[in-house]
Amino acid sequence: MSQMRFTKMHGAGNDYVYVNLFEQSLPATPERLAPLVSDRHFGIGGDGLILITPSEVADARMRMFNADGSEAEMCGNGLRCVAKYVYDHGIAKKDKLDLETGAGVLSVALETDGNVAKRVTVNMGEPILDAAKIPTSFGATPVVNEKLTIGDREFEVTCVSMGNPHCVIFVDKADDDLVLKIGPQIEKATQFPARVNVEFIEIISRTEVRQRTWERGSGETLACGTGASAVCVAGVLTGKLDRKILNHLLGGDLELHWNEADNHVYMTGPAEEVFSGAWNIPQDLPKITDLA
Ligand SMILES: N[C@H](CCC[C@H](N)C(=O)O)C(=O)O
């Protein structure tokens, strides 16, 4: 029985199966593997699959696949965990790393305690506010307080890309009806040709919010780092929030800062390694060559 070695990690409860491709190759395409390993009953369990690979332009590269097998341009919680893995496992023992992502090479700073990283700050780069690049069919740029009709209900949405697309909605109560019923309908709404991640935000003050997230390709997650970054930007664009906020997500807290000086968003939060293991590769899994 051949096996694939993996490490389970999470950032504020947003958990992924991490595979170190510095030391092994994949038994099948990641699009095929992600749904299998993400399955919380028949697989390892997680919100998706994250590959840590060598990079020609950075200390390492992250490729991120949602639980449905779709690849995303960027994953904030995932990148904090990749940074921790790269540091803790000695791939690059530096407390400042450059990591290649689908949204470009991003810089991260690690707070370490001896030999392990505890908290990580990611320079997420500039938010993308051009409707076409988010991409949405809304005409306005930036997309602020647009009306989106779902069934017989109308929502006011603000759309921001952090390399991946986000639809932010400020609500009185982010309840199950909104997150679990409206969230999936917005994810697949025709206004979002690449689908979209949806953030439902309760405002506690100008510097503090509570977030629930319906993620593209993974459903509700306990946290979404790119989403929390998009919320910070949307809060400033709508005049509801200051540029520095504390975001309470179901799985933990993230600190966000949309820095006026460089127009970059900075996200700080935890990264945890839960366990490592070996996954028994199913006999009937089509080999990568079979899929060519
Ligand atoms: N579902 C997202 C990718 C993961 C983002 C999230 N988990 C984060 O921490 O940023 C997408 O398809 O764009």
Image (spheres, helix red, strand yellow):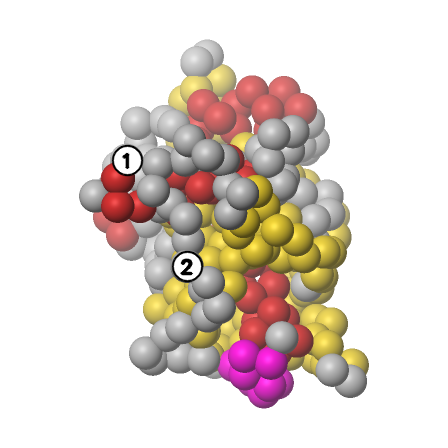
| Mark 1 beta carbon near ligand 1 (under 8 Å) | no
Which quadrant would residue 59 be assigned to in this image?
bottom left
The answer to whether residue 280 is visible is: yes
**x, y percentage for residue 84?**
63, 71
- Name the residue that disc number 2 marks: 25
Q: What element carries label 1?
A: loop
Q: Which mark is residue 20?
A: none
Q: What residue is shown at x 61% (from left), y 63% (from top)?
A: 81
The three-letter amino acid code for the residue at tag 2 is: Ser
**x, y percentage for residue 216?**
46, 38
Q: Is residue 24 above or below residue 223?
A: below
Dot in front, 1 or 2: 2
Is the N terminus in the top left, top right, bottom left or bottom right quadrant?
top right
Residue with the most extreme top position: 152
Residue with the most extreme left position: 292
Left or right: 245 in relation to 108 = right
The magenta segment is 90-97
Q: What residue is shown at x 43% (from left), y 14% (from top)?
A: 151
The three-letter amino acid code for the residue at tag 1 is: Pro
The answer to whether residue 262 is visible is: no
**x, y percentage for residue 212?**
64, 39
- Name the residue that disc number 1 marks: 193
Q: Is residue 93 magenta?
A: yes
**x, y percentage for residue 254?**
68, 59
Q: In this view, does 62 lie above or below 95?
A: above
Q: What residue is shown at x 40% (from left), y 65% (from top)?
A: 101
